[in-house]
Amino acid sequence: MSELKYTKEHEWLAIDGDVATVGITAYAAEKLGDVVYVDLPAVGSATTYMKICGEIESTKSVGELYAPVDGEVTAINDAVVSSPELVNQDAFGAGWLVKIRFSSLPELLTEAEYKALIGEA
Amino acid sequence: MTRKTALYEEHAKLGAQFTDFGGWEMPVRYSSDLVEHHAVRNEAGLFDISHMAEFFVAGAGAADFLNFALVGRASEIADGRAKYSLICAEDGGIIDDLIVYRLAEQDFLVIANAGNRDNVAKALRERVAGFDAELRDESDNFGLLAIQGPRAVEILQTLTSTDLGSLKYYSIDAGRLVDVDVFFARTGYTGEDGFEVLVRAEHSATVWNALLAAGASKGLVPTGLACRDTLRLEAGMPLYGHELGRDTNPFQAGFGRVVRFDREEDFVGRKALEALAGHAQSQRLVGLVGEGKRAARAEYPIYASDALIGEVTSGALSPTLGYPVAMAYVSTEHAEVGSVVSVDIRGTRTDFTVVNLPFYKRTK
Protein backbone atom coordinates (compact mmCIF):
# COMPACT_ATOMS: atom_id res chain seq x y z
CA MET A 1 0.00 0.00 0.00
CA SER A 2 1.19 3.48 -0.81
CA GLU A 3 1.25 6.60 1.31
CA LEU A 4 -2.12 7.81 2.60
CA LYS A 5 -4.08 10.38 0.62
CA TYR A 6 -6.32 13.03 2.15
CA THR A 7 -9.29 15.29 1.43
CA LYS A 8 -9.99 18.84 2.56
CA GLU A 9 -12.86 17.40 4.59
CA HIS A 10 -10.33 15.60 6.80
CA GLU A 11 -10.74 12.09 5.44
CA TRP A 12 -7.80 9.80 4.81
CA LEU A 13 -7.67 7.15 2.09
CA ALA A 14 -5.49 4.06 1.91
CA ILE A 15 -5.52 2.96 -1.71
CA ASP A 16 -5.11 -0.74 -2.47
CA GLY A 17 -5.76 -1.52 -6.14
CA ASP A 18 -9.25 -0.18 -6.91
CA VAL A 19 -10.42 -0.12 -3.28
CA ALA A 20 -9.96 2.80 -0.92
CA THR A 21 -10.16 2.32 2.83
CA VAL A 22 -11.50 5.57 4.28
CA GLY A 23 -11.45 7.11 7.72
CA ILE A 24 -11.28 10.53 9.32
CA THR A 25 -7.94 11.95 10.37
CA ALA A 26 -6.69 12.09 13.95
CA TYR A 27 -6.86 15.87 13.65
CA ALA A 28 -10.56 15.72 12.75
CA ALA A 29 -11.27 13.18 15.50
CA GLU A 30 -9.57 15.40 18.06
CA LYS A 31 -11.55 18.43 16.89
CA LEU A 32 -14.80 16.51 17.15
CA GLY A 33 -14.13 15.26 20.65
CA ASP A 34 -15.28 11.87 21.88
CA VAL A 35 -17.07 10.07 19.08
CA VAL A 36 -20.18 8.39 20.46
CA TYR A 37 -22.13 7.44 17.35
CA VAL A 38 -21.19 6.55 13.78
CA ASP A 39 -23.69 6.26 10.94
CA LEU A 40 -22.23 4.56 7.87
CA PRO A 41 -23.63 3.88 4.38
CA ALA A 42 -24.98 0.43 3.50
CA VAL A 43 -22.66 -2.05 1.82
CA GLY A 44 -23.43 -1.98 -1.89
CA SER A 45 -24.60 1.64 -1.89
CA ALA A 46 -23.17 4.09 -4.39
CA THR A 47 -21.05 7.05 -3.29
CA THR A 48 -20.62 10.35 -5.07
CA TYR A 49 -17.50 12.44 -4.65
CA MET A 50 -17.97 15.02 -1.87
CA LYS A 51 -21.55 13.98 -1.16
CA ILE A 52 -22.33 13.19 2.47
CA CYS A 53 -22.41 9.43 3.01
CA GLY A 54 -22.27 9.15 6.78
CA GLU A 55 -22.16 10.93 10.12
CA ILE A 56 -19.77 10.95 13.00
CA GLU A 57 -21.29 12.30 16.21
CA SER A 58 -19.38 13.35 19.27
CA THR A 59 -20.84 14.40 22.59
CA LYS A 60 -20.62 17.98 21.39
CA SER A 61 -21.27 18.00 17.67
CA VAL A 62 -21.98 16.19 14.44
CA GLY A 63 -19.36 15.66 11.77
CA GLU A 64 -20.26 14.65 8.25
CA LEU A 65 -18.49 11.98 6.30
CA TYR A 66 -17.98 13.11 2.71
CA ALA A 67 -17.44 10.42 0.11
CA PRO A 68 -13.88 10.99 -1.11
CA VAL A 69 -14.48 9.09 -4.38
CA ASP A 70 -17.22 8.03 -6.78
CA GLY A 71 -17.78 4.33 -6.24
CA GLU A 72 -19.53 1.59 -4.36
CA VAL A 73 -19.25 0.68 -0.69
CA THR A 74 -17.77 -2.80 -0.38
CA ALA A 75 -17.40 -2.96 3.41
CA ILE A 76 -18.08 -0.98 6.53
CA ASN A 77 -16.29 -1.25 9.86
CA ASP A 78 -18.80 -2.94 12.17
CA ALA A 79 -16.33 -2.64 15.05
CA VAL A 80 -16.48 1.14 14.88
CA VAL A 81 -20.28 1.10 14.81
CA SER A 82 -20.38 -0.84 18.07
CA SER A 83 -17.33 0.93 19.54
CA PRO A 84 -17.27 4.48 18.15
CA GLU A 85 -14.41 5.42 20.49
CA LEU A 86 -12.11 3.58 18.06
CA VAL A 87 -12.26 6.71 15.91
CA ASN A 88 -10.52 8.65 18.67
CA GLN A 89 -8.24 5.85 19.81
CA ASP A 90 -6.91 4.82 16.41
CA ALA A 91 -8.18 7.10 13.68
CA PHE A 92 -5.76 5.78 11.06
CA GLY A 93 -6.10 2.10 11.98
CA ALA A 94 -8.88 0.31 13.86
CA GLY A 95 -11.03 3.42 13.50
CA TRP A 96 -11.39 3.09 9.72
CA LEU A 97 -14.95 3.61 8.50
CA VAL A 98 -15.68 2.30 4.99
CA LYS A 99 -14.08 0.61 1.98
CA ILE A 100 -15.12 1.97 -1.40
CA ARG A 101 -14.41 0.44 -4.83
CA PHE A 102 -13.73 3.23 -7.30
CA SER A 103 -13.26 3.48 -11.04
CA SER A 104 -11.10 6.58 -10.99
CA LEU A 105 -9.56 8.76 -8.33
CA PRO A 106 -10.20 12.47 -7.98
CA GLU A 107 -7.35 14.77 -7.14
CA LEU A 108 -6.47 14.15 -3.50
CA LEU A 109 -4.09 15.80 -1.07
CA THR A 110 -0.71 14.35 -0.24
CA GLU A 111 0.31 14.07 3.39
CA ALA A 112 2.43 17.21 3.08
CA GLU A 113 -0.48 19.12 1.54
CA TYR A 114 -2.87 17.94 4.25
CA LYS A 115 -0.45 18.90 6.99
CA ALA A 116 -0.17 22.33 5.44
CA LEU A 117 -3.96 22.57 5.40
CA ILE A 118 -4.23 21.91 9.13
CA GLY A 119 -1.26 24.08 9.95
CA GLU A 120 1.12 21.30 10.96
CA ALA A 121 3.56 21.68 8.11
CA MET B 1 -11.04 40.10 20.40
CA THR B 2 -11.66 37.29 22.84
CA ARG B 3 -10.72 37.62 26.48
CA LYS B 4 -8.67 35.25 28.59
CA THR B 5 -8.95 34.37 32.25
CA ALA B 6 -5.99 34.62 34.63
CA LEU B 7 -5.61 30.84 34.22
CA TYR B 8 -5.15 30.79 30.45
CA GLU B 9 -1.46 29.86 30.67
CA GLU B 10 -2.22 27.08 33.14
CA HIS B 11 -4.77 25.62 30.74
CA ALA B 12 -2.35 25.84 27.84
CA LYS B 13 0.29 24.03 29.89
CA LEU B 14 -2.21 21.26 30.58
CA GLY B 15 -2.80 20.86 26.85
CA ALA B 16 -6.32 22.29 26.79
CA GLN B 17 -8.24 22.85 23.59
CA PHE B 18 -9.94 26.23 23.66
CA THR B 19 -13.28 27.52 22.46
CA ASP B 20 -14.95 30.90 22.37
CA PHE B 21 -17.64 31.14 25.03
CA GLY B 22 -19.45 34.40 25.66
CA GLY B 23 -16.49 36.30 24.23
CA TRP B 24 -13.95 34.36 26.30
CA GLU B 25 -11.26 31.94 25.21
CA MET B 26 -12.13 29.03 27.51
CA PRO B 27 -10.89 25.42 27.83
CA VAL B 28 -13.36 23.12 26.09
CA ARG B 29 -11.49 19.96 27.11
CA TYR B 30 -8.11 18.85 28.41
CA SER B 31 -8.22 15.15 27.57
CA SER B 32 -11.62 13.78 26.58
CA ASP B 33 -15.16 15.04 27.11
CA LEU B 34 -16.28 11.63 28.34
CA VAL B 35 -13.33 11.04 30.65
CA GLU B 36 -13.88 14.48 32.20
CA HIS B 37 -17.64 13.95 32.45
CA HIS B 38 -17.23 10.63 34.26
CA ALA B 39 -14.51 12.08 36.51
CA VAL B 40 -17.00 14.65 37.82
CA ARG B 41 -19.70 12.01 38.32
CA ASN B 42 -17.38 9.52 40.02
CA GLU B 43 -14.48 11.47 41.56
CA ALA B 44 -13.96 15.16 40.96
CA GLY B 45 -13.31 17.77 38.30
CA LEU B 46 -11.90 21.29 38.43
CA PHE B 47 -13.39 23.98 36.21
CA ASP B 48 -12.16 27.49 35.55
CA ILE B 49 -15.30 29.61 35.43
CA SER B 50 -13.56 32.92 35.95
CA HIS B 51 -15.37 34.30 32.92
CA MET B 52 -18.49 34.59 35.05
CA ALA B 53 -19.43 38.03 36.35
CA GLU B 54 -19.32 39.08 40.01
CA PHE B 55 -21.26 42.04 41.35
CA PHE B 56 -20.96 43.11 44.97
CA VAL B 57 -23.78 45.06 46.56
CA ALA B 58 -23.30 46.74 49.93
CA GLY B 59 -25.17 49.17 52.12
CA ALA B 60 -28.20 49.64 54.31
CA GLY B 61 -30.42 49.48 51.23
CA ALA B 62 -28.69 46.52 49.56
CA ALA B 63 -31.48 44.02 50.24
CA ASP B 64 -34.18 46.49 49.19
CA PHE B 65 -32.31 47.22 45.97
CA LEU B 66 -31.99 43.53 45.08
CA ASN B 67 -35.65 42.94 46.00
CA PHE B 68 -36.48 45.56 43.39
CA ALA B 69 -33.94 44.57 40.75
CA LEU B 70 -34.52 40.79 40.73
CA VAL B 71 -37.63 38.61 40.70
CA GLY B 72 -36.75 36.89 43.98
CA ARG B 73 -36.60 38.31 47.47
CA ALA B 74 -33.02 38.92 48.57
CA SER B 75 -34.14 40.20 51.97
CA GLU B 76 -35.30 36.69 52.88
CA ILE B 77 -31.92 35.10 52.27
CA ALA B 78 -30.22 34.37 55.59
CA ASP B 79 -26.64 35.51 56.13
CA GLY B 80 -24.28 33.00 54.53
CA ARG B 81 -26.95 31.49 52.30
CA ALA B 82 -27.60 31.71 48.56
CA LYS B 83 -30.57 31.67 46.23
CA TYR B 84 -31.08 31.12 42.52
CA SER B 85 -32.82 34.09 40.90
CA LEU B 86 -33.58 35.83 37.64
CA ILE B 87 -33.22 39.38 36.45
CA CYS B 88 -36.05 40.28 34.11
CA ALA B 89 -36.84 43.18 31.82
CA GLU B 90 -39.96 45.33 32.20
CA ASP B 91 -41.69 43.06 29.71
CA GLY B 92 -40.92 39.96 31.78
CA GLY B 93 -38.25 38.61 29.43
CA ILE B 94 -35.25 37.06 31.15
CA ILE B 95 -32.06 39.17 31.03
CA ASP B 96 -30.09 36.55 32.94
CA ASP B 97 -30.25 33.84 35.56
CA LEU B 98 -27.97 34.33 38.52
CA ILE B 99 -27.14 33.31 42.04
CA VAL B 100 -27.47 35.77 44.92
CA TYR B 101 -25.25 35.13 47.95
CA ARG B 102 -25.78 36.99 51.19
CA LEU B 103 -22.35 37.50 52.70
CA ALA B 104 -23.61 39.58 55.64
CA GLU B 105 -26.63 41.63 56.65
CA GLN B 106 -25.73 44.43 54.23
CA ASP B 107 -23.42 42.62 51.83
CA PHE B 108 -24.45 40.60 48.81
CA LEU B 109 -22.64 38.92 45.95
CA VAL B 110 -24.42 38.35 42.65
CA ILE B 111 -22.86 35.93 40.14
CA ALA B 112 -24.10 36.25 36.57
CA ASN B 113 -23.28 34.66 33.22
CA ALA B 114 -20.24 35.90 31.32
CA GLY B 115 -22.14 36.54 28.13
CA ASN B 116 -24.70 38.69 29.93
CA ARG B 117 -22.30 40.71 32.04
CA ASP B 118 -22.85 43.99 30.19
CA ASN B 119 -26.64 43.66 30.16
CA VAL B 120 -26.77 42.73 33.82
CA ALA B 121 -24.38 45.54 34.76
CA LYS B 122 -26.47 48.04 32.83
CA ALA B 123 -29.75 46.87 34.36
CA LEU B 124 -28.35 46.84 37.90
CA ARG B 125 -26.81 50.31 37.49
CA GLU B 126 -30.14 51.71 36.30
CA ARG B 127 -32.09 50.00 39.07
CA VAL B 128 -29.80 50.97 41.97
CA ALA B 129 -30.71 54.66 41.59
CA GLY B 130 -32.50 55.89 44.70
CA PHE B 131 -31.38 53.01 46.92
CA ASP B 132 -28.86 53.35 49.72
CA ALA B 133 -26.62 50.73 48.16
CA GLU B 134 -23.25 50.61 46.47
CA LEU B 135 -22.93 48.39 43.39
CA ARG B 136 -19.47 47.23 42.30
CA ASP B 137 -18.74 45.17 39.18
CA GLU B 138 -15.70 43.18 40.35
CA SER B 139 -15.75 40.67 37.50
CA ASP B 140 -12.27 41.61 36.34
CA ASN B 141 -10.80 41.35 39.82
CA PHE B 142 -11.98 37.86 40.69
CA GLY B 143 -11.42 34.36 39.47
CA LEU B 144 -13.90 31.57 40.10
CA LEU B 145 -12.97 27.90 40.28
CA ALA B 146 -15.51 25.11 40.58
CA ILE B 147 -14.47 21.81 42.14
CA GLN B 148 -17.29 19.37 41.59
CA GLY B 149 -17.86 15.70 42.24
CA PRO B 150 -18.33 13.23 45.09
CA ARG B 151 -14.72 13.70 46.26
CA ALA B 152 -14.67 17.51 45.94
CA VAL B 153 -15.24 18.23 49.63
CA GLU B 154 -12.58 15.76 50.73
CA ILE B 155 -10.02 17.27 48.34
CA LEU B 156 -10.82 20.88 49.15
CA GLN B 157 -10.77 20.16 52.87
CA THR B 158 -7.09 19.19 52.74
CA LEU B 159 -6.25 22.82 51.90
CA THR B 160 -8.32 24.78 54.40
CA SER B 161 -9.24 24.90 58.08
CA THR B 162 -12.81 26.01 57.26
CA ASP B 163 -15.14 23.14 58.17
CA LEU B 164 -16.53 22.50 54.70
CA GLY B 165 -18.62 19.52 55.74
CA SER B 166 -20.82 21.77 57.86
CA LEU B 167 -21.38 24.25 55.03
CA LYS B 168 -24.81 23.45 53.60
CA TYR B 169 -25.79 23.32 49.94
CA TYR B 170 -26.38 26.90 48.68
CA SER B 171 -24.25 28.41 51.44
CA ILE B 172 -21.15 30.59 51.34
CA ASP B 173 -18.36 31.27 53.80
CA ALA B 174 -15.15 33.29 53.75
CA GLY B 175 -12.01 31.34 54.50
CA ARG B 176 -8.41 30.77 53.61
CA LEU B 177 -6.96 28.27 51.18
CA VAL B 178 -3.17 27.89 50.96
CA ASP B 179 -2.71 31.35 52.54
CA VAL B 180 -5.09 33.01 50.11
CA ASP B 181 -8.37 34.67 51.12
CA VAL B 182 -11.29 33.04 49.35
CA PHE B 183 -15.01 32.48 49.54
CA PHE B 184 -16.26 28.90 49.55
CA ALA B 185 -19.72 28.56 48.01
CA ARG B 186 -21.41 25.17 48.03
CA THR B 187 -22.99 25.64 44.63
CA GLY B 188 -22.39 24.27 41.17
CA TYR B 189 -23.66 23.47 37.72
CA THR B 190 -23.04 19.75 37.38
CA GLY B 191 -25.62 17.96 39.53
CA GLU B 192 -22.85 16.84 41.88
CA ASP B 193 -21.82 18.04 45.29
CA GLY B 194 -19.01 20.54 45.23
CA PHE B 195 -17.81 24.05 45.74
CA GLU B 196 -17.19 27.21 43.82
CA VAL B 197 -14.15 29.04 45.11
CA LEU B 198 -14.03 32.79 44.58
CA VAL B 199 -10.51 34.16 44.66
CA ARG B 200 -8.82 37.40 43.65
CA ALA B 201 -7.60 36.98 40.08
CA GLU B 202 -3.93 37.43 40.97
CA HIS B 203 -4.17 34.34 43.22
CA SER B 204 -6.20 32.18 40.84
CA ALA B 205 -3.22 30.22 39.57
CA THR B 206 -1.97 29.50 43.09
CA VAL B 207 -5.33 28.08 44.10
CA TRP B 208 -5.82 26.22 40.80
CA ASN B 209 -2.46 24.47 41.06
CA ALA B 210 -2.84 23.71 44.76
CA LEU B 211 -6.20 22.08 44.07
CA LEU B 212 -4.90 20.00 41.18
CA ALA B 213 -1.95 18.84 43.29
CA ALA B 214 -4.14 18.02 46.30
CA GLY B 215 -6.58 16.08 44.16
CA ALA B 216 -4.18 14.27 41.86
CA SER B 217 -4.19 11.09 43.94
CA LYS B 218 -7.96 11.31 44.46
CA GLY B 219 -9.07 11.27 40.84
CA LEU B 220 -9.35 15.04 40.37
CA VAL B 221 -8.78 16.19 36.79
CA PRO B 222 -9.10 19.57 35.10
CA THR B 223 -12.43 19.68 33.28
CA GLY B 224 -13.59 21.80 30.36
CA LEU B 225 -16.76 23.41 29.13
CA ALA B 226 -17.71 20.43 26.92
CA CYS B 227 -18.34 18.17 29.89
CA ARG B 228 -19.79 21.04 31.89
CA ASP B 229 -22.52 21.23 29.27
CA THR B 230 -23.37 17.51 29.32
CA LEU B 231 -23.24 17.48 33.13
CA ARG B 232 -25.62 20.40 33.53
CA LEU B 233 -27.92 18.98 30.85
CA GLU B 234 -28.20 15.66 32.68
CA ALA B 235 -28.92 17.61 35.85
CA GLY B 236 -31.71 19.49 34.04
CA MET B 237 -30.09 22.88 34.61
CA PRO B 238 -30.87 25.64 32.12
CA LEU B 239 -28.25 27.46 30.06
CA TYR B 240 -28.93 31.05 29.14
CA GLY B 241 -29.19 31.40 25.38
CA HIS B 242 -30.67 27.90 25.17
CA GLU B 243 -33.43 27.34 27.73
CA LEU B 244 -33.56 30.96 28.88
CA GLY B 245 -33.56 34.22 26.94
CA ARG B 246 -35.15 37.60 26.44
CA ASP B 247 -38.08 35.99 24.64
CA THR B 248 -38.72 33.31 27.25
CA ASN B 249 -40.54 34.01 30.49
CA PRO B 250 -39.92 32.34 33.86
CA PHE B 251 -43.24 30.47 33.81
CA GLN B 252 -42.74 28.61 30.56
CA ALA B 253 -39.18 27.84 31.68
CA GLY B 254 -40.50 26.21 34.85
CA PHE B 255 -39.14 28.91 37.18
CA GLY B 256 -42.44 30.38 38.35
CA ARG B 257 -41.48 29.54 41.94
CA VAL B 258 -38.48 31.89 41.67
CA VAL B 259 -40.77 34.87 40.95
CA ARG B 260 -42.10 36.18 44.24
CA PHE B 261 -45.44 37.95 43.90
CA ASP B 262 -46.31 37.38 47.58
CA ARG B 263 -44.84 40.67 48.71
CA GLU B 264 -45.72 44.33 48.97
CA GLU B 265 -42.78 45.95 47.25
CA ASP B 266 -42.54 46.44 43.51
CA PHE B 267 -39.87 44.81 41.35
CA VAL B 268 -38.86 45.32 37.76
CA GLY B 269 -41.09 43.32 35.46
CA ARG B 270 -43.75 42.68 38.10
CA LYS B 271 -46.68 43.96 36.09
CA ALA B 272 -45.79 42.02 32.95
CA LEU B 273 -44.92 38.90 34.91
CA GLU B 274 -48.23 38.99 36.80
CA ALA B 275 -50.06 39.16 33.50
CA LEU B 276 -47.97 36.29 32.09
CA ALA B 277 -48.53 34.17 35.21
CA GLY B 278 -52.28 34.64 34.84
CA HIS B 279 -52.34 33.12 31.37
CA ALA B 280 -51.83 29.53 30.34
CA GLN B 281 -48.41 29.23 28.69
CA SER B 282 -48.49 28.22 25.04
CA GLN B 283 -45.11 26.50 25.33
CA ARG B 284 -43.35 24.75 28.17
CA LEU B 285 -39.83 23.59 28.81
CA VAL B 286 -39.69 19.80 29.05
CA GLY B 287 -37.20 16.98 29.30
CA LEU B 288 -37.08 14.48 26.44
CA VAL B 289 -35.52 11.05 26.30
CA GLY B 290 -34.99 8.92 23.22
CA GLU B 291 -33.81 5.47 22.32
CA GLY B 292 -30.71 4.50 20.40
CA LYS B 293 -27.67 6.73 20.17
CA ARG B 294 -28.61 9.67 17.98
CA ALA B 295 -28.85 12.91 19.93
CA ALA B 296 -31.56 15.50 19.43
CA ARG B 297 -29.56 18.71 19.37
CA ALA B 298 -30.26 22.39 19.90
CA GLU B 299 -32.59 23.96 17.31
CA TYR B 300 -33.87 20.67 15.90
CA PRO B 301 -37.63 20.99 15.18
CA ILE B 302 -40.17 18.87 17.02
CA TYR B 303 -43.39 17.54 15.50
CA ALA B 304 -46.56 15.82 16.59
CA SER B 305 -47.69 14.02 13.43
CA ASP B 306 -47.18 16.79 10.86
CA ALA B 307 -47.60 19.80 13.10
CA LEU B 308 -44.53 21.72 14.23
CA ILE B 309 -44.95 21.90 18.02
CA GLY B 310 -41.56 22.90 19.35
CA GLU B 311 -37.80 23.04 19.25
CA VAL B 312 -34.94 21.39 21.08
CA THR B 313 -32.90 23.82 23.20
CA SER B 314 -30.09 21.48 24.34
CA GLY B 315 -29.41 17.83 23.70
CA ALA B 316 -26.76 15.15 23.78
CA LEU B 317 -26.22 11.44 24.10
CA SER B 318 -26.10 11.31 27.89
CA PRO B 319 -22.67 10.00 28.92
CA THR B 320 -24.00 8.85 32.30
CA LEU B 321 -27.26 7.31 31.14
CA GLY B 322 -26.25 6.03 27.70
CA TYR B 323 -29.33 7.30 25.85
CA PRO B 324 -30.19 10.62 24.22
CA VAL B 325 -31.55 13.34 26.48
CA ALA B 326 -32.71 16.83 25.54
CA MET B 327 -34.46 19.87 26.85
CA ALA B 328 -37.01 21.48 24.57
CA TYR B 329 -39.88 23.92 24.36
CA VAL B 330 -43.04 22.18 23.18
CA SER B 331 -46.69 23.25 22.97
CA THR B 332 -48.38 22.85 26.32
CA GLU B 333 -50.77 20.18 25.04
CA HIS B 334 -47.75 17.95 24.32
CA ALA B 335 -45.84 18.81 27.48
CA GLU B 336 -47.35 16.17 29.75
CA VAL B 337 -44.99 13.49 31.07
CA GLY B 338 -45.32 10.42 28.88
CA SER B 339 -46.29 12.39 25.79
CA VAL B 340 -44.46 11.12 22.69
CA VAL B 341 -43.14 13.67 20.20
CA SER B 342 -41.08 13.36 17.04
CA VAL B 343 -37.74 15.16 16.66
CA ASP B 344 -36.39 15.82 13.18
CA ILE B 345 -32.78 14.67 13.52
CA ARG B 346 -31.21 15.94 10.31
CA GLY B 347 -34.04 14.59 8.18
CA THR B 348 -34.93 11.50 10.21
CA ARG B 349 -37.97 11.62 12.47
CA THR B 350 -37.17 10.07 15.84
CA ASP B 351 -39.54 9.47 18.76
CA PHE B 352 -38.79 11.09 22.10
CA THR B 353 -40.82 10.85 25.31
CA VAL B 354 -41.49 13.72 27.68
CA VAL B 355 -40.06 13.05 31.15
CA ASN B 356 -39.64 14.97 34.38
CA LEU B 357 -36.39 16.87 34.87
CA PRO B 358 -33.71 16.24 35.94
CA PHE B 359 -32.56 13.24 33.93
CA TYR B 360 -29.89 12.50 36.50
CA LYS B 361 -29.97 12.92 40.24
CA ARG B 362 -27.03 11.98 42.41
CA THR B 363 -27.50 9.40 45.13
CA LYS B 364 -26.64 10.86 48.51
Image (cartoon, rainbow, N blue to C red):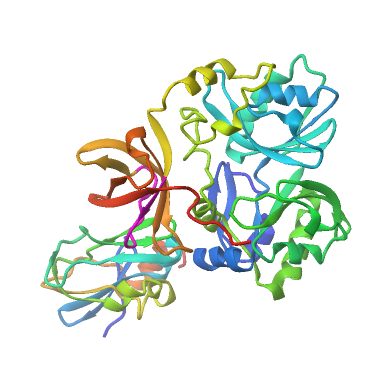
Task: Identify the residue shown where x is 69% and y is 66%.
Answer: B151
Is residue B149 rendered to the left or right of residue A24? right
Residue A86 horizontal/vertical position (percent): 39, 75
Task: Identify the residue shown where x is 75% and y is 66%.
Answer: B154
Residue B311 horizontal/vertical position (percent): 35, 40
Residue B84, image quadrant: top right
Q: In what quadrant of the picture does the C terminus of chain B appear? A: bottom right
Looking at the image, which is closer to me, B340 or A117? B340
Is residue B304 rendered to the left or right of residue B216? left
Residue A32 horizontal/vertical position (percent): 42, 61
The segment highlighted magenta reads B287-299
**Residue B321 in view:** yes
Query: Which secondary structure dominates the residues rendered in magenta?
Result: loop
B292 in magenta: yes
Query: How many numbered callouts?
Result: 0
Vertical placement of residue B150 versus B234, above or below: below
Vertical placement of residue B318 versus B328, above or below: below
Looking at the image, which is closer to me, B18 or B161? B161
Vertical placement of residue B16 versus B173, above or below: below
Task: Identify the residue shown where x is 67% and y is 20%.
Answer: B263
